[in-house]
Image (cartoon, rainbow, N blue to C red):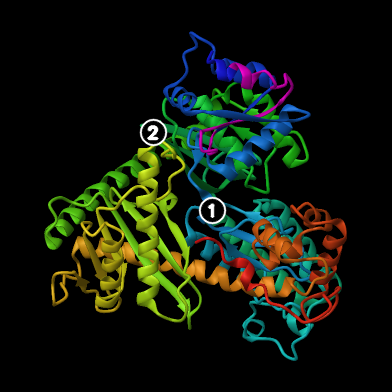
Amino acid sequence: MVPDWEEKLRFIPEGTGVYIFKDAGGRVLYVGKAVNLRHRVRSYFQGGTRHPARIAAMVGRAAEVDWLATDSEVEALVLECNLIKRHRPPYNICLRDDKTYPYLKVTVQEEFPRVAITRRVVRDGSRYYGPYTDVGAVRETLQLLRKLFPFRTCKEKVPGSRARPCLNYHIGRCPGPCAGLVDKEAYRAAVEEVCLFLEGRREELLRGLERKMRQAAARLDFERAALYRDQLQAVRRVLEQQRVDLPRLGDLDAVGVALAEDRACAVVLVVRGGRVIAGGHHVLERTGDAPASEVLAAFLKQYYSGVDFVPKTVLLPEAPGEEAGVIAAWLGRRRGGPVELVVPRRGARRRVVDMAAENARLMLAGHLADEEARRIRADAALAELAGALGLAQPPARLECYDVSGLHGEHVVASMVVLEGGNLRPSEYRRFNVRAPGPDDYAAMAEVIRRRFERARQERELLATGQLSSKEARFHRLPDLVVVDGGRGQLAAARQAMVEAGFGHIPACGLAKGEERLYLPDRQAPLALPPDSPALLLLRRLRDEAHRFAVSQHRRRREKAGLASLLAEVEGVGAKRRRALLRAFGSLEAMRAASVEELAAVPGMTRRAAEALHAFLKGGAAGGGPLRSGNRSGGNQDLHGPG
């Protein structure tokens, strides 16, 4: 054992908890849980122990280890899942980031709930169904639900405040809570039927509709009975269309896993009432040489930490290693009842697991084939681009820059990276522009200058050993710089690159609309064919830079407005505003937080949290304690170093 590690490991307790390996720069490399923290962490450094290649590489990079003790192994598993989701450690088996997957969100915490598509899961009291891999199917489901169980989609803050309902009411897509045309109990009963449908509890839903139809008929309310009859028939038709010819298996999930190269694919078949009602696939990355049981355990922990409904039975192709018991206990806690992990050997249940495994194999094969096809297309596009620009070889790394602002306010810029033909979001960078006024040329010059001056400084520090490559953010240089704009933006960027000492790096500009390439040594712009792979690649890169810049500009405007609003709350100063914005990010999330959650933000006190909670619940227009004196904006608190 390395002497330094001997000293570090002396103070690790022997109890249950989570351990976190970090590199010299403090980046989280790996998160694990253990029944005995000291024994588990020591096992990584014992001589003669053969680790998988992925773990051996992690140990070679690790410079420190942190730990967090827990009261039970289930709590350790929950903490492990949360830390993996937050840090995305490079040596953990990770589900491909599912933040962009669509969910169906039912806002059950509202007086008159809504159903909507979202790509963000926040703890606001809503129920989330998903994630789904096909947004088109989600939209079709939402349209179907609005036909079967009309509900509101508007964002009216105070239902019943409108004098007359909107068009959705008149076409039968909304019962009109905004105009007070439906009582709360009846509306919420309809929303519960939506939840039953989404959870696959179809038989319960059918029985409820039939009971309401008979009750309405018994009251001689034949018009309402006819509505329930039509709704019942529509739901039955949908269920018949969705039915898969399988024996009646009850409610369960069947999981199948396939591994190839450094990837894995897991498929979950959702079976409710003997019907396969959904089947989503999920790609796992950085699996390395991990056995299938380890991959399966990693998938179960990450997948079920993001779903609201857990069935009482989960069918698996094999046991998820030594963690099977704790995973089952954790799922039982999430479900509110016992959950059984079953590895069927024969019969109908085994056939369902085999079906999931075969789907996983096909999905993974298609995923790898798509990756290879994208690589071939990218290589061809980069080769064509090199020929068009007169480069000696295809550029391996491209950086594209865009500036976004509104009349010179909250001006930001983005740097996005394309490497090996693929976008690299981890390499993206944002800049808060310091140049005053609406001057795109000056803003572009400032951003390029700052980027390459940082590169020069970091390379000097790296050469003298004062900076590690893990701490450096700008030391890698592009083979081609692309700016979003025409001749003016390109000239400003080139001048800044020359001043920073990097004038030898090629650069070009891609103007919107006309889609012409501007080069420093050409008077006339270069026109590539509209279907040119090189042009399509540049447009993809340019559009991504524009999207990234606009999203940052929008966030700065929203935070500036939110900071101005928070400035009115007594006891919430500039430092606390910044901490609140970092912790919650939006007014909606802050309003949904409890006093305890607000008080837990670094720098907040219980008194300030109560004042803020009262203010937010009272709304911006009234209620809540206000700061005495002149109202002050919070924009000055939002300018970081860039």
Check the image and report above or below for 439 versus 146: below
Residue for badge 1: 99
Secondary-structure class at tag 1: helix
**CB under 8 Å between discs 1 and 2:** no
Can residue 595 be seen here? The reply is: yes
Closest to the observer, 192 or 537: 537
Specify the amino acid type for callout 2: Asp
The N terminus, quarter of image: top right
Check the image and report above or below for 247 versus 519: above
- Quick check: is 154 in the magenta stretch? no
Check the image and report above or below for 9 versus 67: above
- Distance in Å between CA atoms under marks 1 and 2: 21 Å
Secondary-structure class at tag 2: loop
In the image, the segment drawn in magenta is: 6-29
Residue at image coords 69%, 68%:
587
Counting residues from the N terminus, which is met first, the one under dot 1 or under dot 2? 1
Residue for badge 2: 262
| Residue 487: quadrant of the picture | bottom left
- Residue 137 - label: none
Closest to the observer, 196 or 246: 196
Closest to the observer, 178 or 241: 178
Residue at image coords 54%, 58%:
102
Q: Residues within 10 Å of mark 1 (few under 14, many from 20)?
A: few
Q: Indicate left or right for 257 with 521 as reference.
A: right
Question: Which residue, as the protein is rendered here, is positioned at the far bottom?
Answer: 163
Q: Indicate left or right for 203 with 337 as reference.
A: left
Specify the amino acid type for callout 1: Lys
